[in-house]
Every structure is written in C-alpha cells, then in structure tokens.
Amino acid sequence: MAKNIVAAVTGASGALYAKLLLEQLCALRGQTGEVAVVFSDSGRDVFRYELGRSADELLAELPVKVYDNRSFYAPFASGSSDFESMVIAPCSMGTLARIATGVADSLICRAADVMLKERRRLVLVVRETPYSLVHLRNMAAVTEAGGIICPASPSFYSSPQTIEALAMTVVNRAISLAGLEVKSFRWGEEQLR
C-alpha cells in the first residue's frame, strides 16, 4: 500500500540532499502516495544559493504537493491524517531544537510534533559539524521521543564516483529509515554502480 510522506527542507547547508530526496521519493511511485513538501524560508534561500536555481523550479517538475510553512491547514498538521512518515533534509540545528522542545511554531515543526505524538516515523537528516553539547542533547531528546537522527554523513564503501552518488548514500538511508524500500548498496552485497 502506498504511503503518504512529508518531506521538509530547512536552512542548513545541504540543499543537494533535499533535491535528491524529492526526486527519489517521486521515483518511488507505487510505494509513495502523496509526497507533501514544505520548505522553510531559509531552506528556499539556501537551495537557491547552493544549487543555483529556485526550489519552485524543481517543485514545478515533480508530482508533489507543496504546503506553506506558515499554514497549519495541511492535513499532516493533525494526528488524524494518514501521513505515515516525515523526513527533514537537511535539518538545521534550530529546527532540531524546536522539535526537541515541542515548539511547533511552523508547519514543519508541527508536523514533526504530530509524527512523534502519533508514534510515526520522523527522520531528521541533521547537517552540522561539529556538534555542540546542546545539539547532542537535542538529538537525544528527539531520539527518546521516537524520532530517528540520520546525520548527513555519506558512506564511501560503495565507491561513489560523483558528488550526487555520494549524497545519495545519505538520501537512500533516510528513505529506508522512513519505511520505504530503495535499491541501494548494502554491505556484503555486490556493489551497485
């Protein structure tokens, strides 16, 4: 059965993760129902800065439904919705802090709060280095509440040949953690190239 999933993009560096996540979720049609997308204002700014195009240009090419981060009328802002998973990629430390402390001051944070309270899958692709003790405590709080911290730390054992292939190691891991099946390199299997 197809799963409805929320993909959120915040203002941390790592817009390539967001682009690849959205493209991969759309490529998994059959497994995904509605792919709902929410960008923070900073997420849009970083996307344009790092990728040289606006988020709206990419979104116009994809079969997704876009929601305004300032609106709480999105279906996944309520626990009664049928959205099963949420991936925030990249997830800024500010967004992490608001989720960890229950501050639902935006649609992204409210949707994350709903995922936690309803015991659904919430995957945060955090993008910062190094981590401060505050960051680590916030990660622990989200983990204790049922969320999954997936650091944007790419793997190299699949011998990725491009920046995109390297970033896909993180994206595919996040998608797998969100409960979807994605064909990617698995340790002990023949390399996929």
Image: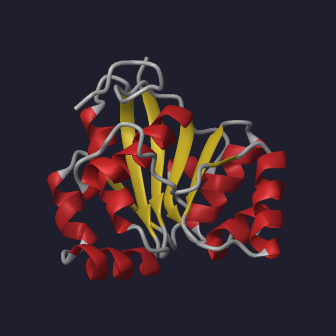
Res. 18 image quadrant: bottom left
Residue at 49% over, 70% down? 10
Q: Is residue 73 left or right of residue 136?
A: left
Res. 16 image quadrant: bottom left
Residue at 67% over, 42% down? 79
Q: Is residue 135 above or below residue 192?
A: below
On the image, the x and y values in percent for residue 181 come to: 42, 24
Q: Is residue 135 left or right of residue 58?
A: right
Whether residue 25 is visible: yes
How many dots with numbers? 0
Residue at 48% over, 39% down? 173
> What sort of colour scheme is used for the picture?
secondary structure
Res. 102 image quadrant: bottom right
Q: Nearer the viewer, residue 126 or 120?
A: 126
Image quadrant in which the N terminus is located: top left
Q: Is residue 135 left or right of residue 86?
A: right
Image quadrant in which the C terminus is located: top left
Q: Is residue 171 above or below residue 98?
A: above
On the image, the x and y values in percent for residue 115 come to: 67, 45
Whether residue 21 is visible: no
Residue at 38% over, 29% down? 185
Q: Nearer the viewer, residue 93 or 161?
A: 161
Q: Is residue 182 left or right of residue 84?
A: left
On the image, the x and y values in percent for residue 189 come to: 40, 18
